[in-house]
Image (spheres, rainbow, N blue to C red):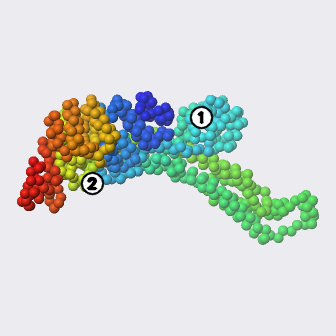
Amino acid sequence: MELEAIPGIGKKTADSLASLENAKEALRDGDVATLASAPGVSTARAARIARAAIRHRHDDVDEFLLTDRARAIHQVALDLLTDRAVTDYGARRLETLYPSARQSRIDEVRALTERALAQEPDTAVIDALDGVAPLREPTDVVVRDRCLATADGERYAKAREAVPELSVEHVDDARELAELGRAYSSVIALDETFAGLDLEGDITVDPHALDNPVDVVPERSLSFFAANRDRILAAIAVHREAKTDTEADLNALEQVLDRIDDDGSVADDDEVNRLDAAVDALDSAVSEAERLANDRLRAAIRQRDVTIEGTDLLSLVEQGAGVDSLLERELADDYSAALSVAREELVGALDLDEDEATVAEGVLPADPTYPVERDPAAVQSLRQSLTRKRDRRATRLKREVAKELADRRPVVERLVADALDLDVELAIARFADDFDCSMPRFVEEDVMIEGGRSPMLDVDFDAVEPVDYHLDGVRLLSGVNSGGKTSLLDLLALIVVLGQMGLPVPAATAELKRFDGLYYHAKTQGTLDAGAFEHTLREFAGLADDGRDGLVLVDELESITEPGASALIIAGVLEALQNRGAAGVFVSHLAGEIRAAAEVDVPVDGIEALGLEDGELNVDRTPKPNHLARSTPQLIVEKLAEADDREFYRRLLEKFD
């Protein structure tokens, strides 16, 4: 699939999508989350791109929704579905659904719907879905304790691109490589020419290192799992609650996730924790060792009477000696004891092992001096030794855990994707449950609805009265005001839209013809001016000449102009539509006048008012076929005539016959 061949994808968007590893698969599957991860592509735009790609794949070029009201009905359908999605991904994925005249597209979504209707919406599963989201790649991974090194310019550029998380250093010779070994905890040399050299520091020669990114930069895998831990754990909870079959070992996956901290480091390793604590406490521990040594030495000096012969004093002065020489001569043993106690304190405070303790011996000077002061170079050497030891062990552990996690990544990606897809299916299942839906059956002719109830009414759905309706050809629909004529049109439109989206419809049973498009002309507010009236006539002229097999729904077209002219115009429109075998419903209060003006037989159905009760209409919402329903004024006159036998009411009533 050529990206720019999809309508709405220009070169800039195509280049952005091309940066994704699986752009074509995402376009094929309508994977909005993956598409939205492309640079510069918002979630809303990703949904539009996915929908355009689906249309392209099915060669579905003709628009089904031909009017604003038809498009509004489609939006209502989407809102009803997306309101039942838990995840943002689920909502965006549902937005890729659209009514289509292509049987291949309808069948594709019907297959999804059949899977959805097999699901049992469960509160625990729905609650668990709240934490699931598409996996994301961390972009802030930076590793400072090690680097890659090479003397080759081409390999240098390749390494920078392949491993942006690490520093890549250009070196000319072994001397520069050795300098890096002193600056970093570990160095990976990419050139075979450095093999066999005896260099100080942790320097590894591996010409094939870039082929093993998990070994070179285990932080990449660890950071991915750390950043997505909550999403993965939520997906695990979803699969547990839903009791789905999955290739993932959920318990083992939880255990390995427990081994990494939120920052991507390996959690709870005693040795790394010990070394980390030692590095953090080094300065304070050295200060305490200094204090202890000086306190011991000060006490020893106070307790000793030091006598210096005159000749000895003169000799010391002539030699330029000071108190240090005096200490060495008179208090050597006391100094050694104080130093021993201080060093033991330092080793104990930092919990150093034998080798580390040897390095720590140089922190306090062996030669007597007062006051005892640390050797900064020795402290820095100990700090570097502990830090490198910690970092090397941490890196080794990271590689172990990262390798295990990297092997699990495909399974985890499938685990999360399946949980997100389950949200889509459950949204459809909940929609079907909430509105007592059934799968429509497609037939060659006519539309048959039994037990249809509209979820678009501003009442509780359980209070909606079911209606039946059979549509064949073009029909007029009459009835009293507020009797449900517009609601029936909305229900028809919604059922056709949902059916041709491949979804269940709010009816006990439904048989639908597969239409090429939906033309729904909503009720016009007030009489149109000349320009708008002319535009409306042009629309109907185009509709009459349209060769497509569409469904036409029109609500009170008589409001476009004067009633007398309206009846003639509507009659002409109905004649044109009937002559070309179209299907449609025209709601009108002028049904009698239109039928009289038409040169063809136009069936009239009626939503009959059963009467007035306490000023409220009692209406049978199911239209009676071939029946011109009484108007509200007629009902009122009938009520008055029954209650009062005056001639005035009788004559008014005769006018309706």
Badge 1: few (under 14), some or many (20 or more) residues near its Cα, within 10 Å? many
Q: Earlier in the sequence, mark 1 or mark 2?
A: 1
Residue 159: which disc?
1
Query: For the residue labelled by badge 2, is the local secondary structure a helix, a strand or a loop?
Result: loop
Q: Tell me: 498 left or right of 131.
A: left
Q: Amino acid at mark 2?
A: Asp
Q: CA distance from mark 1 to mark 2?
A: 63 Å
Residue at 62% in and 56% down: 280
Residue at 47% in and 40% down: 41
Q: Amino acid at mark 1?
A: Ala
Q: Tell me: 192 left or right of 475.
A: right
> Which of the 4 image quarters holds residue 569?
top left
Q: Tell me: 279 left or right of 229.
A: right
Residue at 61% in and 32% down: 157
Q: Could you say where residue 652 lies in the image, as x and y percent from the top left?
A: 11, 53
Q: Could you say where residue 9 lies in the image, as x and y percent from the top left?
A: 44, 33
Q: Report the front residue among 337 and 586.
A: 586
Q: Could you say where residue 224 lies in the image, as x and y percent from the top left?
A: 49, 44
Residue 649 seen anywhere in this rendered image of the structure: yes
Q: Which residue is identified by label 2?
A: 458
Residue at 65% in and 43% down: 184
Judge whether 308 appears above or below 52 on screen.
below
Marks 1 and 2 close (CB-CB < 8 Å): no
Q: Report the front residue among 297 and 246.
A: 246
